[in-house]
Structure formats: structure tokens, C-alpha cells
Image (cartoon, helix red, strand yellow):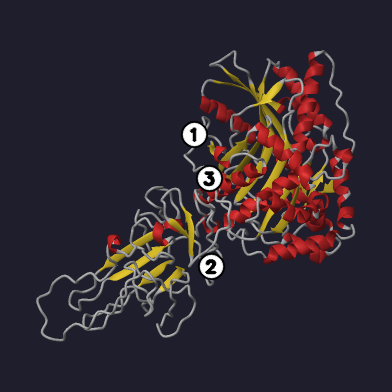
Amino acid sequence: MPAGRATPLAPVQAWFFRHIRTDLHQWNQSVLLELSRAVDPTTLRLALQAVVAAHPALSARFAPDPDASGTPDAAARLMVAAEPFAAYPPQEVLWERDIAEEADFDRALEDTERSLDPLEGVHVRAVLVHDRRSPAAPAHLLIAVHHLVVDGVSWRILLEDLEHALTALAGGVLPALPAEACRYEDWVASLPAVAARDGEADHWRGVAAARASAHTLLLTTPAPNEEHIRRVEFSLDPEATARLIGPLPARLGLEVHQVMTGAFAQALARWRGTRTVTFDVETHGRHGRDDLFRTVGWFTSIHPLVLGADRALPPEDYLAAVGADLTAVPDGGVGFGACREFSPDAALRDLLRELPPALVCFNYYGQADQLSPSGGFTMSPRPIPREHSARCERVYGIEVYGIVHGGRLRMGLTWVPSPADGVDEAGVDALVAQMAWVLATLAGADPAGVAPAEIPAPGTGAPRPAPARPPCRPRPGPRRRTAGRSPCRSPRSSTACSSTRSPTAAPAATWSSCSGAGTAPWTPTGSPRPGSRCSTGRPSCAPPSTGRPNPAWCCTTTSAPRSYATRPARRTSTTCGNATGCAASTCAAPACCGSTSSTRPTPRTAARRPRGSCSPSTTCCWTAGACPSCSRSSTAPTSPAVCCPAANGAPTSATTPAGWPARTPRPPASSGPRRSPTPPRWYGPRSPARRPA
């Protein structure tokens, strides 16, 4: 394409500009290679220059669309062709660094990641790192490319071209790399025809309607930025991997990517205890286009998926049940982005751009075993620090990926804490356990042999020890909710988890669903009510056995006596999220969590309510069938999410649930002469040791 020619953005590029507003320059894809033999830096620099010159997308810049000035759409940009290295000197494509300690290594990689400028056309930078402590050790080569112009398939092309160029230069010949059969901008120009295909618009209208009606697995609040990103991985052995990606897809009539997507859908359904799941799926986006086998660019397709089947089915039966929905996605979902950006129907474009955001995204990269056919370099196991800036917006709370490397299937999750959506360490542990169980069962392997481990956070250098995690053995049967209680237990505190939902709760108070025996449950999370304190003195607390902040395991009781003259009852306020798993053992209601406050002083001469009865200002978060309801005026029932039994076990109505002792109101105090003042008796919760079993 002639320099200066402008073309529209690809759908995924438009998606990037709409979602990423901060530090656009640092949103990269990178590879860290160990060179198996010494390479002359000048030769390596020339080889990298040849690779950049062979692929026009690596030199393009992104400029505002002059015809869309004043529009609020952040994606109103154009991709403008440019000559190779028009934005920076060719020599600057490769840096060299000598290091003497680990901190220097990470600093060299981070500086390289921060050095790109996609808006001006600086998309590629590499750094060759030599360790002066071990001169005989292989050098490391980091190649960072901005994600706007590269994807997973492109890396195979780039590394093959780099090796070919190095071989040619080593033989004293200028490298002659094959031209691209189809330019990236030509592929983008073909997408309006995809959007106009028969049935394409109708398919995505139906998916949009299903996503809009979903009541779970949607992002209720914007995900935090990338600063506190964490990663967990597990892998299957080569034999299990071979069975999973070989005979199983053929037996089911599905592609490997569809098998992985369906397996992940069942893990999600079991994690959240729901039949219908929705999430976003990434595919390579080159479906049906054999002429793109040498084209470098960002072709990724991101499309919504909604699946529904009985989560209690054996995994292979579950795949068979959702197989028709998986295969119904046309061309790997390329048409979703095409309709969103290029459909002639403006209403459809707006509909697809305004879909409720998903909490989770899934991407199966495929096999990455042949990075260097001649063995010139191998993938380094070291983590790459900060491909994305810590200040960058994060689109999803959880991103799940799968890749086959070295014959082993590696599954991983990157996530950032988002308590409002149940994304915390316990929730991620539970999801990992479900994924491991489903995949191991499909592969005929023992789930107990799968050992998840936490990958070091970016920029930490040396790996951190993996935390102790429970065996991945969720119970294969369905989870039943009985009287608002779940039979599953938390491996961290041996306490039952609540599985109730408030009909009137805010969107953040979503389902609490157990993941299965031996796994950490996903619990409802959210900040304590204003003015409450946790027993640990922090704005959120957890069972003492974990010590980790988790608002879903928060319980606090504070008391403050009023005037001794009127001898009132003490004012108490209790906030809890998982009644039997509170940090302070003051919540005894086994199936009810909430906030109980009695702000009116009660004179001794007044008849007292039964302990645990509702006061005029009582409020509650979650209740269940065993938790009777009352109103704020104590005269008419309203929502069951209004009041809770108190910690002494007394019911909130005249009817006493089975297993709880009957209690009667305390009789009025005598109206005779007052005795000498003494401290008021405590009419609050009894000791936990005195609760009924």
C-alpha cells in the first residue's frame, strides 16, 4: 500500500481504542527467547530490520479520522501506511544491555516494553541482554511488538522470518523474505461483505438478546486496572493432552478450540451454579482465508457466546449438549466484529456496541511447539514484566487462556481482584479447580494430579513459591441448595458457605454458589455497610485461617452503652457476609447474613423483644427459607431480605425453626423503687459455645 494511504480500523483495533484510554503505548505482545548460540548484534539488527520491512502493518501509524472530528467515539481513527522506519532510526530496532543483577534484567525488559509508540508507527523493539555474571550463559532476546499490529498467529510468521533472515545473513546473503499474499488493509476492506452475508446479522441479533437477558457472569463494575494483576496456571501431562486434542474432538465432531470452549463453559456453570453461562471468546480471526497464511497483523475476533446445558452432566455429555451452539458460530465469530463496525444497519451497530460486558474472556491459542525449526532459539521460562502498563484499563475481570507447549496443555487465568463480581483468591481457586476437573475428566486423567501454581507477578523477577492449594477434586454431582445452605465446605476454614441471594440486593450481591467438595466456594462479596467495622480492624476481613481480605467473610459486632440513668439495652450492630464463616464468632444464623441494628434505647420498664427480634431499623443483605422476614415497622412482612436471626439463635418470629430453642420475651421490670446503679446486664448474643448444634 502506498505510504500515506489511510484505511479503516479492523474491528479488534476499534475495540482497543474504545476500551484502552491510558498508556496506549504499552499494550504489547512479547516473546522472550534464549539464543542457543552466540549471535552478532549487528547481524541480529539487520535481520530484525528485514522482518519489519517485509510486513507493512509493522510500520503503520494511527491517526484521527478527519471526517469524524467531534464524534465521541474513541475508535474514530484510521490506519495510515508509512515507509519502514519512518518514525525511528533503523538502528533503534535493537538495543543491547549488559546486566549484573536480576533487577537490571527486569529493568531492561520494562524499558523496552515502555518504548513503543503505535500512534506514530513505532511498533517493534528488541533488546539483547547479556549476563556478565555468567558469560557462557545463553543471551536473552526480548522482542516487543504493540498488540495493534500483531497476534498469536503473526508470531509464528515473525519468528520464522527472523530465523530465515539470520541464516541468510550468516551466509553473506541479503535476506529475501516472501511477500504477503494478502495485505492486512485488504482483509479489512473485505469485512463489510462479511457483515452483509445472509443470516449473519440475524445470528448476532439473537446472541445479543441472549446476552442481554443473562443474569450472571456479567461485569457489574469496571474491572480494576492492570496494577494488581495475578496469574494462576496448571497443566496436563503429554499423554492426557494428546487424548484431549486428538481423538476426543474427532469423536464429538468438534474442533479443538470448540472442545476447549465447551469445557470452559461447563467449568463456569459449575463455578457459579447456573445452567446458562455467557462469556467472550477470542479466536484467531482468519477462518476461511488461506491467503492470510503470511500476513502479519491483529486479526483476532472477539465475540459473545451464550451456552446453556445441565452442568451436572459428565463433561463429554455436556460437550455433546452444547456442540450445536458451538458449531453454529459462523467463521469463528468474525462476523460479530464485522457487523458491529461495518453493518449498513446503524441500529445493529449500536446494539452490538452496547452489549452488557462479560466478566470472563476465553482464548485457546493452539499449539506453539515449533517456534524455531532449526533450534536457533527457545522460549524462555522467565516471566515478562509489564507487557501492559499498570495504569491500563482492564476489560475483563478474568481472562483465561490455553496453549499447548512442549506437548503439554497449559491453562491459565489472569485476574485482578474485583470483590463486587466475586473475583478474589477464593473464587479464582474454585474456578481453577472446576477447570482442572472438567479437562482432566475429558482427558481420562486423575484430577487430583493437577497442581495449580501461581506465576510470579510481572516485574518480580525470581519466581515466588506457589501457595498451597487444595487438590482439584470438585464433587462431580450437582450442587443442591437446601434451606439456603450449601453442603460444600471451604478448605480454608471448614465452614459451610452460604448459597442464597437477595431478591432486592444491588447487582453486586450476586449468586453465592458452591464449587464442590474440597474446593474454595465462590461467596457473595461486597463492602460492609457504612459505619461497620471488621474484627480485624480493616474495611474487609476474612476467617482467621486465611488472613486475606474478603468482604464476603466479614462479621463485626460493636456495642456502646447509653446513659446509665435510663438503663437502656446496648446498641449493637452486626454486619456479616457468611454467617458461619465470620472472623468474629458473633453471627450464629446458619443461613442468613445481614445487618441488624437497634438504635433506639430500650428502658428497663419497657417490654423487651425476644433476643434477635427485628428492630425498627433492621436491615439485611441475604436471607434464606430458615430466616423469617419482617418489615421495618414490624407490622407487615416485606422482602425476605429484611431481617436476620441474631447471634444467640433466637428466631425473628413466633415460629421457632427446628433445632433452635424456643425463647420468650423478657417480662417488664418492676416499677418499684430504684436500687443503686449497677452496670446494665448484657442482653446481647450469648457465647458461641452455648449455641444449639
The answer to whether residue 631 is seen in the rendering is: yes
Up-down: is 129 above or below 285?
above
Residue 228: mark: 3
Query: Residue 179: x, y in percent?
Result: 88, 31
| Residue with the mark numbered 2 | 506
Q: From the viewer's perspective, is 39 left or right of 97?
A: right
The alpha-carbon separation of the residues under discs 2 and 1 comes to 38 Å
Up-down: is 585 above or below 544?
below
Badge count = 3
The image quadrant that residue 44 belongs to is: top right
Q: Residue at x 24, y 73 (%)?
A: 562
| Residue with the mark numbered 1 | 464
Q: Earlier in the sequence, mark 3 or mark 1?
A: 3
The alpha-carbon separation of the residues under discs 2 and 3 comes to 26 Å
Q: Nearer the viewer, residue 111 or 423?
A: 423
The image quadrant that residue 73 belongs to is: bottom right
Up-down: is 110 above or below 68?
above
Query: Residue 227: x, y in percent?
Result: 55, 45
* Labels 2 and 3 touching (C-beta < 8 A): no
Q: Residues within 10 Å of mark 1 (few under 14, many from 20)?
A: few
Quadrant of the image containing the C terminus: bottom left
Q: From the viewer's perspective, is 273 left or right of 307?
A: left
Q: Amino acid at mark 3?
A: His
Q: Amino acid at mark 1?
A: Arg
From the image, state whether disc 2 or disc 3 is nearer to you: 2
